[in-house]
Image (cartoon, grey):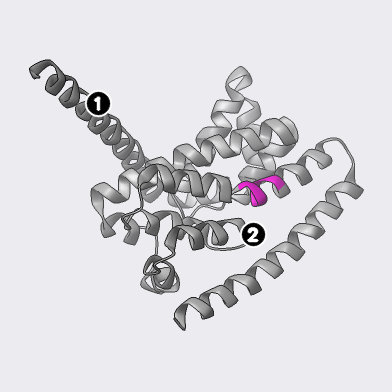
Amino acid sequence: MAEGEGRGRGARGGRALAAAGCVAAAALLVAAALYWGPELWAFFTDGDAVRAWVDAQGPLAPAAMGALVVAQIVVAVLPGEPVELAAGYLFGFWEGTAVCLAGGLVGTLAVTALVRALGMRAVRAFFSAEQLEGVSWLRDSARFELLMLVVFLIPGTPKDVLTYVAGLTDCRWWRIAAIATVGRIPSVVTSTLAAGFASQGDWVAAGATLAATVALVGAGAAAYAAVRRREAAR
């Protein structure tokens, strides 16, 4: 009995230590964002700068790109599209997509741990009251997990704020991570596919992919507004 209890305490201690590590890493990223905010914004919005920095890391380039994806999700005000495009351009469709999804998984886990540890203080560090009000209907819905997946699958929806808000719910951390990772696939795929075509010099295919992406974003925005109205009327 005592041995079993000891193993249980050890497992809980290990999980607590891992969660503390995620919170500490995320907190460092937040502090860095606050201190180097303008420089980070300039870097993340410059696709050429992102590609040059990642390419300069040599064999560690995939890990460096994954770290940028994690940073963009944790420091939610930073744009993610240039990073996804850079991943597709440097690594091609398959590897670029894998790197982005792996980074997205780690970033989502870090955000969930941060919000579970700090609560609304973490959320308010990046989002205004208006932004939070915009997704309050989703957080309060009895069908939260299903709606979260639907919203994540729609290109152009506010995924960053939703990732933070999900941490405030009772949804289990692994379900949040799974939903967010699967839900990011369409937006990541369109970005890495277009950039992969561009890196091969196939500008017709790249342009067609970007045009399809713009159309999906427009349709997604309309679908998101319709879902929001329907849920708000319940």
Residue furthest to the front in view is 1
Whether residue 120 is situated above or below residue 43 in the rendered picture = below
Under circle 1, the secondary element is helix
Q: Amino acid at mark 2?
A: Pro
- The quarter of the picture where residue 198 lies is top right
The segment highlighted magenta reads 185-189
Q: Residues within 10 Å of mark 2 (few under 14, many from 20)?
A: many
Disc 1 and disc 2 in contact, CB within 8 angstroms: no
Q: Residue at x 61, y 25 (%)?
A: 61
- Which residue corresponds to mark 2? 155
Q: In terms of sequence position, does the residue under pointer 1 or pointer 2 come before the other?
A: 1
Q: Residue at x 62, y 18 (%)?
A: 59
Q: Amino acid at mark 1?
A: Gly
Specify whether 179 is left or right of 136.
right
Can residue 131 be seen at all in this image of the molecule? no
Instruction: Kindly report the secondary structure that dominates the magenta region of the rendered protein.
Output: helix
Residue 60 image position (x, y, % from top left): 57, 21
Indicate which label's residue lies in the foreground, 1 or 2. Answer: 1
Q: Nearer the viewer, residue 230 or 192?
A: 230
Residue 188 sits inside the magenta stretch: yes
Q: Where the N terminus falls, by quadrant?
A: top left
Q: Where the C terminus falls, by quadrant?
A: bottom left
Q: Residue at x 43, y 46 (%)?
A: 175
- Which residue corresponds to mark 1? 14
